[in-house]
Image: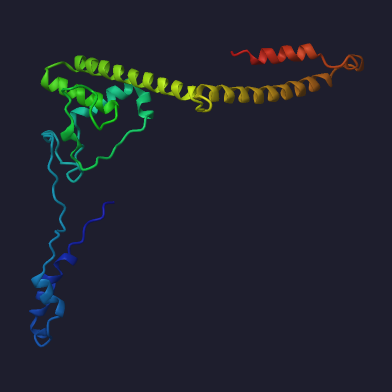
């Protein structure tokens, strides 16, 4: 159930004037706040304004809907961003700056020079803006502009990786230590999980073996556990299905 707006509090001045005009209350002085409210009236209206619509209304609709719902703002760059980050999902893992210094950073960008812009970190937004400039100024199609911008982006990203690798090698030559790489950390975690699984599998196989030995005869139990058979069961369990 939609709760309606109460407009009676907004008409308190009109209500006070109507009450004071009653002949029975002519000897009663008006409240002090009435004069103040006459001089400084409330500026806010209580009615909800009808928001401007950016899309034409459906003529088949009998009853208008969502009149007070803000319209969804869409920009041409939105589709280009979705396409780029769909093809390059790992670019979202890179830290990016989402705030501007003074709100006029776009004035210092010249996308005719390429993807790299001064004061802006290389990211997917550079590809999107470069693609938009190529489509609007050089008349390229979306696919052609996307390929051109991606080619420039790949070249610069590859150069960044080479520079970072050279910097690490030079730092190690003078004694710097960077710790373990992500690959080494992943291998250690995987090995630790494998050892935990191996110990758990050994206990499960031992319990299964003991439960099966309880049904054997005393002469068979005197032979002791079959160690090679246990190792074979572990090897079979380690083979992925």
Color theme of the render: rainbow
Left or right: residue 195 compared with residue 228: left
Q: Residue at x 72, y 11 (%)?
A: 232
Q: Nearer the viewer, residue 183 or 108?
A: 108
Q: Is residue 80 visible?
A: no
Location of residue 174 with respect to 39 vertically, above or below: above
Residue 92, how many percent across, how many down? 35, 28
Position of the C terminus, as image quadrant, is top right
Task: Tell me where residue 237 appears, x and y as whole percent.
Answer: 66, 15
The residue closer to the viewer here, 81 or 204, is 81
Rendering quarter of residue 161: top left
Residue 171 shown left or right of residue 221 in the figure = left
24 lies left or right of 91: left
* 221 over 120 or under it: above or below: above
Instruction: Please tell me which residue is depicted at 33% across the width and 33% down the height of the picture.
Output: 96
User: Hey, which residue is sitting farthest front in the picture?
Assistant: 174
Q: Is residue 45 found left or right of 154 in the rendered image?
A: left
- List x then y, in percent, for residue 115: 23, 23
Measured from the top left, where is residue 24 in percent x and y? 11, 85
* Quarter where residue 143 is shown: top left
Residue 109 falls in which quadrant of the image?
top left
Is residue 180 visible to us here?
yes
User: Where is 237 relative to 76, above or below?
Assistant: above
Residue for point 63% across, 22% down: 194
Near-viewer residue (104 or 98): 104
Front-most of residues 165 and 184:
165
How many tags in the picture?
0
> What residue sits 89% from the left and 14% below the top?
223
């Amino acid at each position: 159930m939609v709760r309606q707006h109460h407009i009676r509090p907004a008409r308190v001045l009109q209500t006070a004037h109507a009450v004071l005009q009653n002949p029975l209350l002519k000897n009663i002085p008006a409240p002090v706040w009435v004069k103040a409210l006459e001089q400084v009236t409330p500026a806010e209206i209580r009615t909800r304004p009808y928001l401007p619509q950016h899309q034409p209304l459906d003529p088949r609709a009998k009853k208008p809907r969502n009149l007070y719902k803000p319209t969804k703002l869409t920009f041409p760059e939105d589709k280009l961003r979705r396409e780029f980050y769909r093809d390059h999902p790992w670019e979202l893992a890179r830290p990016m700056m989402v705030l501007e210094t003074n709100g006029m950073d776009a004035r210092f960008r010249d996308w005719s020079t390429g993807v790299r812009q001064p004061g802006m970190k290389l990211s997917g937004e550079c590809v999107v803006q470069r693609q938009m400039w190529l489509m609007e100024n050089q008349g390229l199609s979306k696919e052609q502009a996307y390929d051109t911008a991606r080619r420039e982006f790949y070249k610069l990203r590859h150069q960044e990786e080479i520079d970072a690798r050279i910097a690490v090698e030079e730092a190690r030559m003078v004694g710097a230590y960077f710790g373990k790489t992500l690959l080494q950390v992943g291998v250690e975690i995987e090995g630790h999980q494998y050892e935990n699984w191996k110990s758990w599998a050994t206990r499960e196989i031992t319990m299964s073996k003991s439960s099966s030995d309880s049904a054997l005869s005393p002469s068979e139990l005197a032979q002791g556990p079959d160690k090679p058979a246990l190792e074979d069961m572990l090897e079979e369990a380690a083979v992925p299905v």
